[in-house]
């Protein structure tokens, strides 16, 4: 039976970049494949320019993401002994950028600076919480056990989509961070908190997948291809296996 590495993505701000429109940088509702690969690559110490290692990492893992209805934090208020469900909030941050880089380059090959200020808006998800089941593709250059070791002791500091979005907790729980299950959806059914939409890239039972352009082709040139993502709804009453 395959194994799945369970990541917890929790922080006051998260941003999972969608197609950009120069001065508008939107965020998707869930972590993109490109961003998750970047997070793992940072922990593993894979440089952005190392296209071979980046491709090997992409060929080693797949992702199933659950947008959790609530975070598990002892400081959060409860109602009748249960955490109060909440939803993340999407807000846009306003930027004024001076000397922004242009596509045009000077005689030395460096990007020219825009002489005029540029107004930019960037979206963030506030109080979002995600659980990710990382599956292993074969043959895997980067096996899950090796990735887990680097997630506990990363080479570079990971962030939640943008450098301005720090983690509020470790990516892995101390225990039960590696689960054996039939697929990523079944693995997420073993991890609290239950409930929420699940975005899977390997399960094709849903008839109407959404198409997401987050499949990195060339990371330096920010070129992406599309992929299909299958959306499932997980019940808050899913059957959870309690460890002995």
Image: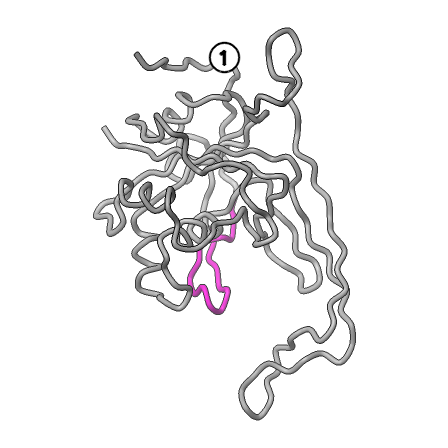
The answer to whether 74 appears left or right of 238 in the picture is right
Q: Quadrant of residue 75?
A: top right
In the depicted view, which residue is nearer to us: 198 or 169? 169
Q: Is residue 183 left or right of residue 227?
A: left
> At 35% from the left edge and 65% from the top edge, which residue is drawn?
51
Residue that carries the numbered disc 1 in the rendered image: 237
Q: Which residues are magenta?
A: 211-226
How far across and down, in percent of the image, does residue 35 sit? 49, 51
Residue placed at 57% from the left, 48% from the top?
Answer: 16
x and y, in percent, of residue 87 in the image: 66, 29
In the rendering, at what x and y percent does residue 23 appear?
A: 71, 63
Viewer-side residue, 130 vs 27: 130
Q: Nearer the viewer, residue 25 or 19?
A: 25
Q: Position of residue 157 (x, y in %)?
A: 47, 52
| Quadrant of image for the C terminus | top left
Tell me the crowding category of disc 1: few under 14, some 14 to 19, or many 20 or more residues within 10 angstroms, Cα based.
Answer: few
Residue 150 colored magenta?
no
Task: Name the quarter where the N terminus is drawn.
Answer: top left
Way the structure is coloured: one colour
> Residue at left 62%, top 48%?
27
Residue 113 relative to residue 40: left or right: right
């Amino acid at each position: 039976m395959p194994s799945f590495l369970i990541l917890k993505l929790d922080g006051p701000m998260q941003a999972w970049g969608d197609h950009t429109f120069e001065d508008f940088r939107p965020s998707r509702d869930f972590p993109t494949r490109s961003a998750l690969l970047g997070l793992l690559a940072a922990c593993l110490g894979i440089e952005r320019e190392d296209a071979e290692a980046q491709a090997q990492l992409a060929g080693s893992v797949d992702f199933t993401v659950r947008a959790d209805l609530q975070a598990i934090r002892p400081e959060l208020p409860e109602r009748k002994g249960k955490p109060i469900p909440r939803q993340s909030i999407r807000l846009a941050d306003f930027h004024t950028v001076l000397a922004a880089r242009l596509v045009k380059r000077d005689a030395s090959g460096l990007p020219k600076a825009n002489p005029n200020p540029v107004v930019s808006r960037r979206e963030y998800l506030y109080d979002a919480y995600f659980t990710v089941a990382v599956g292993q593709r074969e043959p895997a250059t980067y096996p899950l056990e090796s990735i887990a070791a680097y997630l506990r002791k990363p080479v570079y500091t990971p962030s939640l989509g943008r450098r301005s979005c720090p983690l509020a907790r470790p990516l892995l729980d101390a225990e039960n961070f590696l689960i054996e299950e039939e697929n990523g959806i079944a693995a997420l059914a073993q991890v609290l908190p239950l409930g929420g939409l699940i975005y899977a890239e390997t399960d094709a039972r849903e008839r109407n997948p959404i198409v997401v352009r987050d499949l990195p082709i060339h990371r330096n040139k920010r070129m992406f291809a599309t992929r299909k993502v299958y959306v499932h709804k997980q019940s808050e009453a899913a059957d959870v296996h309690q460890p002995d």
